[in-house]
Image (tube, helix red, strand yellow):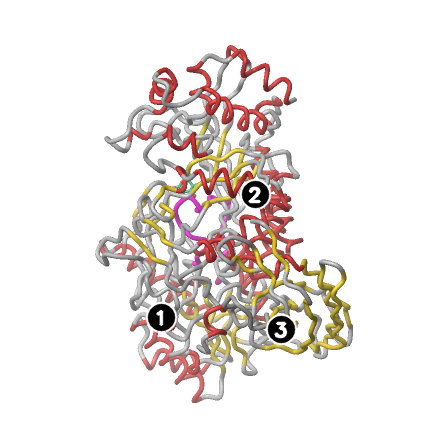
Amino acid sequence: MPKDVEELIRQMSLEEKAKLVVGRGMPGFFGNPPSRVPGAAGETHAIERLGIPSVVLADGPAGLRINPRREGDERTYHATAFPVAVMLASTWNPEIVEEVGRAMGEEVREYGVDILLAPAMNIHRNPLCGRNFEYYSEDPLLSGEMAAAFIRGVQSQGVGACVKHFVANNQETNRFFIDTVVSERALREIYLRGFEIAIKKAKPWAVMSAYNKLNGEYCSESEWLLTEVLREEWGFEGFVMTDWYAGEDPVKQLKAGNDMIMPGKAYQINPQRKDEVEEIVRAVKEGRLSEEVLDRSVKRILRVLVNSPSFRGYKYSNQPDLDAHAKVAYEAGAEGVVLLKNEGALPLREDAKVALFGTGQIETIRGGTGSGYTYPRYTISILEGMRERGLRVDEELAELHEEYIRGMREKEEYKVKMVFNQPVMPRLPQDFLSEEEVARVAERNDVAVVVITRVSGEGADRRLEEGDFYLAKDERSLLEKVSRAFHERGKKVVVLLNIGAPIEVASWRDMVDAILLIWQAGQETGRIAADALVGKINPSGKLPVTFPKDYGDVPSWSFPGEPKDSPVKVVYEEDIYVGYRYYDTFGVEPAYEFGYGLSYTTFEYKNLEVRLEGDVVKVSFEVANTGKLPGKEVAQVYIRAPRGRLDKPFQELKGFRKTRLLKPGEVERIEVEIPVRMLASFDGKEWLVERGEYEVRVGSSSRDIRLTGKFTIDEEIRYPP
Ligand code: BGC
């Protein structure tokens, strides 16, 4: 194929080359013709003369985002809504994430799309980032491994994945121009590391550069980022595209190594911009851009696209196996449920009479909004899931909720509005039942389950307010009423958190007996919730992100930047101390730590062996199910470095493994290999592994370390970047 690509390039005119590196404008908007796959986010120019077809690009991480209906067409084009990425990361199970990737990849291919604009893998720097639900974790190793698995799955289907947003796009506030100021060490160890792992391990077809500036320069215009680091150091061989309408100067973008400008026609939304194709042609003619640089991008793009379904003339069916993929969505969600608290309340007896509170039982959140939104065939609400699974739900109470929602949504203030084909639903007050009504409900039921929901999305960060990071007053008073009424009668109260990112829990968790974090689990949310409540699913998810006790404890205090009213710059003062790296090093106690999650059974760790063999640390140990129910455990390996020249976090995650389903009494031997290179820190010039004694800390969470061992590095080791 490469030979053909060279030949194609020889035959292309300057204008054709310029067209190939610029999208043809956001399809279906601003007078642009719709994509041949309506709802897709972008499409490239076809060059018919040379037999180059256009290729179609569509979002996103939780499912393929295309329009479910087409004008004058009876058929539907729904795609599966999978659990959001933070929930996929909570599985700590690359195999299931790869399966999600495979299923999504099949939908991409069968709906006629070439490249999926996923995975998204920015680090959860701050709990308020509006897109955290689309991203995996606060830890780069976990993010990188999850993204690699997802990419492998997608690309096994003959379509491409595009990792995004490269890099340090950790907030939505002023995302188009915010300048992220961050040290090279923090960049390399935290923000770049996950991308590095995903790119080296899984070779995505494409990378999407981020909107923001990085130390003063737009990511899409940074030669250091897109050429030195990405290609020269990491060996990336695909092509780079901009995020939609990112940056200012397409000529600079091409020079920096940003090969494709998307979606094209930025002038349609920004009067400062010009037609990119014309700009590029003019720059070449005026000698401001060498044709070699343009050819370089054309070549990178074509080398990838010749393998795309569109190039190969693939006849797609428009009939992916949605039933099979629904099962994958369920399985993935089942492994990502995190049990945060359980004082004898769960699992529920299957015949327990359940009083469900909270409008989220009906208006269940399957995922976030923006480009990560999905259009599945259905979403099973929590109430529907519980009914379907035969739980004895208090129907009178459910009906009260249905009526309440119906009435409220008719009021102007609470009307559901459609914005860009997505519903915007103002949060409803939750405390609409009187003390007496709740008491009557408590009398006739065995247990209360209170649903708390949150939704966020692209374009805005979450708020440090009641009703968002904090419980609203009405949510708090509902919890108070319910727990008083049920506890007085010796009955338990369970909270279901249907959220996409941490909220404050420390001030109210003592009021309830159990908290089950079901995240935003996609179209199967209700089934997953019901099965986890009764123990058909034994929770085996672990937190990929710290739940802080309060916002004041969060290390990224500079979020979202300065000046406060409309930030232009955000300085990452906390440097490498992101997430648990901060909480552990500075002795700050979180509400629930990184890696935390309970089970309905118990596990014991034993027989640790640690060996340094050449340039690999081999860690092996056993995990035994010592409880009464089958379950899976996520075993985590942290390393604590010796004191040396460079500051190091207290400990860092260097490996993990999820066990198979262990029956009571069953034991699994786990082996984890850690390349010595992964112990290095960046000293400003090079990667450095300092000499001394390293502690291996094996545990069930970052703060529940069950076994420790040691190994020694005799001589310091340096690696070039
Ligand atoms: C988002 C990307 C997305 C693109 C296309 C941008 O606004 O940041 O994540 O892939 O739009 O929809």
Give the extent of the magenta segment. Answer: 364-382
Q: Looking at the magenta stretch, what is its main secondary structure? A: loop
Q: Name the front one of labels 1 and 2.
A: 2
Determine which of the numbered discs, if any, sits on residue 132 in the image. none
At label 3, the amino acid type is Ser
Determine which of the numbered discs, if any, sits on residue 233 in the image. 2
Residue identified by numbered label 3: 700
Q: Earlier in the sequence, mark 1 or mark 2?
A: 2
Apparent side of residue 51 relative to residue 586 in the rendered image (left or right): right
Residue 640, x across and y down, in percent: 59, 71
Which quadrant of the figure has residue 532? bottom right
Q: Is residue 625 above or below residue 313?
A: below
Q: Which of marks 3 and 1 is nearer the N terminus?
A: 1
At label 1, the amino acid type is Tyr
Residue identified by numbered label 1: 551
Which quadrant of the figure has residue 281? top left
* Helix, strand or loop for disc 2: helix
Query: Is any part of residue 334 visible from this angle?
Result: no
Residue 275, x across and y down, in percent: 32, 23
